[in-house]
Amino acid sequence: MSVSAGGLPETAASGDPSPPPGLVVVGHFDQTPGYGVNRPHGADSWLFTWTTGGTGRLRQGVAEVQAGPGDLVVLSPGVRHGYAVAPRARHWRFWWAHCQARPTWPAWLRPHAVDDGLYAVSPVPAVLHGRIEAAFCRMRADARWTGTGAPPAEAAPDDRVAAAHGTAARELALCSLEEVVLLATAGARGTVPPPGADPRVRRAAELIAADPGAPHTVRSLAGSVALSPSRFAHLFTEQLGQSPMRALREARLRHAARLLEGTDLSVERVSAASGFVSPFHFNRVFRERYGLPPGAYRAAHGDRWSEA
């Protein structure tokens, strides 16, 4: 989804102000060529976009992406940004939300960072698209809740934008957006089997992604998909480009990085929870992968993300 940075086309709303940071605003647009927003000074709040049709072009600082259906793109506060219908695209249909991110969200987004506070979560498996769309619909309806009676079942068909002013409405709306962020980032993580991959390879990759800290082995994974260990290892490596144990190690390292960023577990407990038997081995392979030992990685990333 990433493309080279460059200037956005002349926008239709240059310098368009963003909502104030304490407000939660959600909307659904279907825009035609010529639509765009440019904020030279950035925004005070985070911007989340989920594309459902056409193509959008989003820039944050010097980084830029094009977003198609099923892509979650997030812009952090305080950095100049702009977004528009992509060149040569017929339209851009997308959900968007302005708000302050909950403390856990930046850690989930960080593996999908492009640069300058721009996050592109892709590919999100198609099986999750309906659930994410429903969460945005619910977010827009909940933003209308007054705090008395039951929240509205859904927004009116022509209700494109809703702002959550009350505390209860804001928290309900943020719960739906949290579901979006969690589904998208969890679904897009790890090794994604290509279309048409053997369903047994796909199932094994899903088992690794679902619980990287489990004591998986080539034999146990092969048994779970009714293959011999040698046949399974051959199929997995052929279709995913890496061996099952290499894929497992990468999944465990990603899991460990998320725990270091988002929890106060000791390095030893992070190592064990991520499936590493030896803390010494964990320290060595983590440093090889991320360029820092686990403790230094947490000091560089954990506090900064928790304060976002």
Image (tube, rainbow, N blue to C red):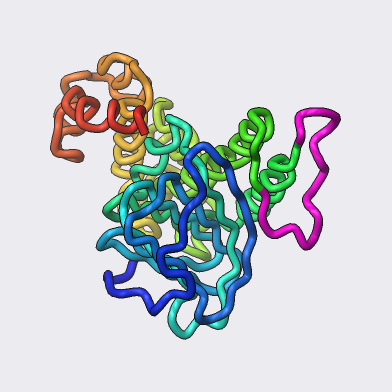
Identify the residue at image location x=37%, y=21%: 263
Residue 140 on image: x %, y %: 69, 48
Does the magenta portion include 155? yes
Q: Can see residue 301?
A: yes
- Establish if 176 lies above or below 40: above
**Relative to residue 279, is residue 183 drawn left or right?**
right
Q: In this orientation, which residue lies closer to the viewer: 283 or 19?
A: 19
Q: In this orientation, which residue lies closer to the viewer: 76 or 71?
A: 76
Corner quadrant of residue 86: bottom left
Q: In this orientation, which residue lies closer to the viewer: 208 or 60?
A: 60
Corner quadrant of residue 212: top left
Residue 170 on image: x %, y %: 62, 35
Identify the residue at image location x=41%, y=35%: 219
Outermost residue toward the bottom? 88
Does the magenta portion include 288? no
- Establish if 16 lies above or below 147: below
Residue 57 on image: x %, y %: 43, 70
Tally of marks? 0
What secondary structure is the stretch in magenta mostly built from? Answer: loop
Where's the N terminus, which quadrant?
bottom left
Residue 220 on image: x %, y %: 45, 33
Identify the residue at image location x=75%, y=37%: 145
Q: Can see residue 226?
A: no
The residue range painted magenta reads: 146-162
Identify the residue at image location x=79%, y=36%: 151
Where's the C terminus, which quadrant?
top left
